[in-house]
Amino acid sequence: MEKGKIFVALDVNTKEEALEIVSDLKGLRACFKIGKQLFTSVGPELVKEVVAMGEDVFLDLKYHDIPNTVAMAGVAAASLGVKVFNVHAGGGRKMMEAVRTELNKFDDPPMVLAVTVLTSMGEDDLRETGVDDTPADQVKRLAILAKESGMDGVVASPLEIELIRQACGENFKILTPGIRPASSSADDQKRIATPASALKAGADYLVIGRPITNAPDRRKAFIDILEEIK
Ligand code: C5P
């Protein structure tokens, strides 16, 4: 998948709203992220429908379970035809290796990204879970583990890009949410970057939700972001 791709977060509750966003952006080579909210509301049929429309889908369900369960969920995701899905690196080496082993049986397997430390967690939150390292050290440790375990890349905040690039090299993919075009509101995001600065810092792919989905003219909002990146 080409560097610079934008995944538009379909954070809505209904199939109708999701399909409206997809059709508003038709032909602009946007990709779409389907996460827990929409998936739990409407299920895999919608994923199949968006894939059947020829769109690239990132299934953002952050699997974290025993190796066999996550590997089989990965097979199910691959069978839906998604281009990207993700797991929690905290599930460990055996879990991620099991996913890789199963995906290797596909001719054109989806990309698998690992979530390291949720960006909502600070040092105190980590300590309560028994991790005494700083979030940055834990992100680095889990990114290296994900790479060693056969993951294609990680989901990371704009502030973590450089650290992960250094630790995991040029070919390891980095997908970054928390993106806000220069002109838009931060909403509830705190550590944000503009699309251009995230790409410059080394991100491969961007996730952008509300600045596009809540815009009065979604096509224009998306095209403006492409312009800003150029
Ligand atoms: O609307 P907004 O651009 O903030 O949406 C960002 C999307 O990326 C949401 O679906 C959110 O859940 C997801 N995300 C995030 N920060 C992370 C991981 C995922 O904002 N660290």
Image (tube, rainbow, N blue to C red):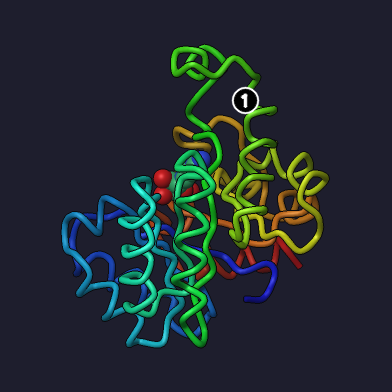
Question: Which element type, helix, strand or loop, lies under badge 1?
Answer: helix
**At 55% across and 48% down in the image, what residue appears?**
177
Residue placed under numbered mark 1 in the picture: 135
Q: Position of residue 227 (x, y in %)?
A: 69, 67
**At 52% across and 37% down in the image, what residue appears?**
186
Q: Position of residue 179 (x, y in %)?
A: 59, 47
**At 61% across and 44% down in the image, what residue appears?**
156
Q: Is residue 188 left or right of residue 20?
A: right
Q: Inspect the image, locate mark 1, and give the three-letter code of the amino acid beneath it.
A: Pro
| Quarter of the figure that contains the N terminus | bottom right
Q: Position of residue 31 (x, y in %)?
A: 49, 71
Q: Is residue 212 left or right of residue 79?
A: right
| Quarter of the figure that contains the C terminus | bottom right
15 relative to 65, above or below: below
**At 67% across and 42% down in the image, what residue appears?**
158
Q: Position of residue 148 (x, y in %)?
A: 66, 53
Displayed quadrant of residue 80: bottom left
174 relative to 57, above or below: above
Q: Badge 1, how many Cα within 10 Å: few under 14, some, many 20+?
A: many
Q: Is residue 23 left or right of residue 1?
A: left
CB of residue at label 1: within 8 Å of ligand 1? no
